[in-house]
Image: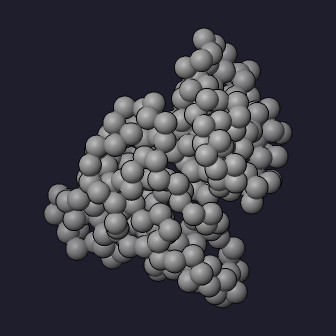
Amino acid sequence: MERLATETGAGQWGSALAFATGLFGMECTVYMVRSSYDQKPYRKSMMQVYGAECIPSPSPRTRSGQAILDRDPETPGSLGIAISEAVEDAASHENTNYALGSVLNHVCLHQTIIGQEAKQQLAMEDVYPDVVIGCVGGGSNYAGLSFPFAGDKMTGKHPDTDLIAVEPSACPTLTKGLYAYDFGDVAGLTPIMRMFTLGHDFVPPAIHAGGLRYHGASPLVSRLVHDDVVRPISYHQNEVFEAAVTFARTEGIIVAPEAAHAVKAA
């Protein structure tokens, strides 16, 4: 294997894989959701500095991408489209494998190092959270923070902890989607998964939060929502950004559009 193909929404995963492949002398192609590609040019620059190729998705490079462009040349893209392109790219090149950065179980479990570290930091102060809040797109970010606390809730150690998953009203997968089997990508190249979904051909409006533009959600996160372990909520874009501006002016921290959804919930 000489090359990896992947997708990225907000750009964090694409940047991480670009750096990692560079360390191993491998090539890397990242299909980045077009809205993020246009709105976050420095993410693209970061991946290119690390040695990766960053392509706005959908693109004419793949059949799935070209099909989307033929239907809507001005489409802002989605994570589902970018996944289709990366999978097709890997399948059509013998020297290339596909690396997924969200949604699937192994990714979510790997990310739980975040929540495990958070628990240890809180334990140092002898405190435990009443509420755990995170934003949800594909689900790996939210799973990473919340799953260690979800385990405590399900085993009865801390049964009253409120685990809140926040998503944009423009892409209300967990709050309005169906809990059903669906493809993880727009072109239907991936295996079907049981998850909350708006339909694999759903393309969200051109909201700013490029990392939350996914029609489905992690099967593990979806199951916890289905079983009432996690409570999903959604907010409209304007109120999310108003909360983020207030947070910046009071705390001095400017958060990403995706994380701003969690700030609004808090």
- Residue 215: x %, y % from top left: 45, 53
The residue furthest top is: 94
Examine the rendered structure and indicate whether residue 92 appears above or below residue 241. above
Q: Is residue 17 visible to the viewer in this orientation of the structure?
A: no
| Camera-nearest residue between 64 and 72 | 72
Q: Is residue 165 visible to the viewer in this orientation of the structure?
A: yes
- Residue 213: x %, y % from top left: 54, 56
Position of 193 with respect to 47 (left or right) is left
Can you tell which quarter of the image residue 48 is in?
top right
The residue furthest left is: 156
Colour setup of the view: one colour
x 56%, y 43%: residue: 81
| Camera-nearest residue between 235 and 88 | 88
Examine the rendered structure and indicate whether residue 23 appears above or below residue 174. above
Q: Quadrant of the N terminus?
A: top right
Position of 73 with respect to 150 (left or right) is right
x 64%, y 29%: residue: 62
x 30%, y 73%: residue: 162
x 22%, y 65%: residue: 228
Can you tell which quarter of the image residue 86 is in?
top right
